[in-house]
Amino acid sequence: MGRIALVGFAGCGKSHIGKRLAHRLNYDFVDLDDAFEEIYHLSIADFFQKYGEAAFRLCEQKVLNDNLLKDNIVLALGGGTPCFGLNMQQIVERCFTVYVKMSPVSLHHRLQNAKRIRPLTQNLNSEDLMSYIEKTLALRETYYNKAQICVKGENFDLEALVETLNSLNVKNDDNLCQKNI
């Protein structure tokens, strides 16, 4: 089994890192948000507007569970995915999990300049966005910190992550440990 899940706040770089990591490991890459939009034929922003966040989280959970059955895969999860129901418990049980951590200031900069519409932040001014990031990140880090390792999203080092994954023998998932790189 080779499953790696990237968790972290919106805008931290999970998709970018995930694509690079999957390529480097010769794994498949799945961005959970993209998979959701492909299955439901709606953007996440439109789905939120039409059906609300509760319906989104239930459908997102199904997409997550379907992808947790695949092998040799790197999954980039939505920022709120680990925080719903028992998702993080299932993610940690079925995947080697990496928390891509960024400071609120860095996240603010990225989200202000994001190309992708994010339903939970799209209508916030700069001050409200910063407040939202700080409050929401404080709540979500309880889940994110359950990941086996944590990497800095700023100045991310792909080779250091690959080296750590190799040293932990991620393919066998025998001796996982908490480690910051």
Image (cartoon, rainbow, N blue to C red):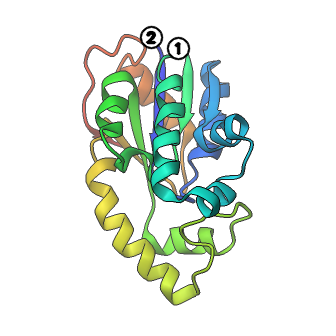
Residue 160 tag number: none
Q: Amino acid at mark 2?
A: Met
Q: Looking at the image, do the residues carrying marks 2 and 1 touch, with CB atoms under 8 Å apart?
A: yes
Residue 71 tag number: 1
- Determine the residue positioned at 33% across, 39% down: 88
- Determine the residue positioned at 30% across, 38% down: 86
> In this image, 46 relative to 98: left or right?
right
Which SS class for mark 2? loop
Residue 1 tag number: 2
Q: Amino acid at mark 1?
A: Asp
In primary-sequence order, the first of circles 2 and 1 is: 2
Work out whether 45 lies above or below 147.
below
Q: Quadrant of the N terminus?
A: top left
Q: How many marks?
A: 2
Front-most of residues 78 and 141: 78
Work out whether 112 lies above or below 74.
below
> In this image, 106 relative to 167: left or right?
right
Query: Residue 89, percent across and down?
Result: 28, 34
Q: CA distance from mark 2 to mark 1?
A: 5 Å
Work out whether 77 lies above or below 45.
above
